[in-house]
Image (cartoon, rainbow, N blue to C red):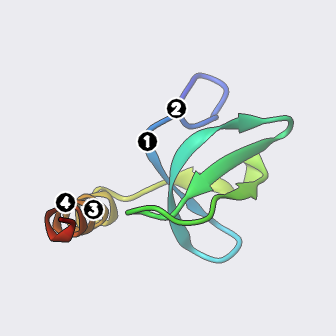
Amino acid sequence: MTGDGVPDTGTYAVDARDGRLGQVMGHVGMYIQLRPPGGGKEWDCPPGDVRPAPPGEVLRARVREINAARRLP
């Protein structure tokens, strides 16, 4: 996270509104764009509703991404 509490691009964060884990893809206007681990449709989250992802959740997300990449031809 940066000094102002905004997560860095590429890190994982949790949308506190519904508990979804997402990778920070960027910042657009007043929102932080999150993408589900392994890909999918991005969603916007207000900065006040984003919290750092626990290390265990980040590890599980990375393992899922690696496993998914290995299944691709």
Residue 26's image quarter?
top right
- Please give the residue where the numbered disc 3 appears in the rendered image: 65
Work out whether residue 21 or residue 70 is closer to the camera in this orientation and state it: 70
**Do labels 1 and 3 touch, CB within 8 Å?**
no
- Please give the residue where the numbered disc 1 appears in the rendered image: 11
Q: Amino acid at mark 1?
A: Thr
**Do labels 1 and 4 touch, CB within 8 Å?**
no
Q: Is residue 6 above or below residue 39?
A: above
**Do labels 2 and 4 touch, CB within 8 Å?**
no
C-alpha separation, residue under disc 2 versus residue under disc 1: 6 Å
C-alpha separation, residue under disc 3 versus residue under disc 2: 19 Å
C-alpha separation, residue under disc 1 versus residue under disc 4: 16 Å
Residue 66's image quarter?
bottom left
**Do labels 4 and 3 touch, CB within 8 Å?**
yes
- Please give the residue where the numbered disc 4 appears in the rendered image: 66
With 63 as the anchor, is 7 left or right in this view?
right
- Please give the residue where the numbered disc 2 appears in the rendered image: 8
Q: Secondary structure at mark 3?
A: helix
Q: Secondary structure at mark 4?
A: helix
Q: Nearer the viewer, mark 1 or mark 3?
A: 3
> Which residue lies at the image location 37% right of the left edge and 59% below the top edge?
54
Q: Is residue 29 above or below residue 18?
A: above
C-alpha separation, residue under disc 1 versus residue under disc 3: 14 Å
Task: Say whether disc 3 or disc 2 marks the residue closer to the N-terminus.
Answer: 2
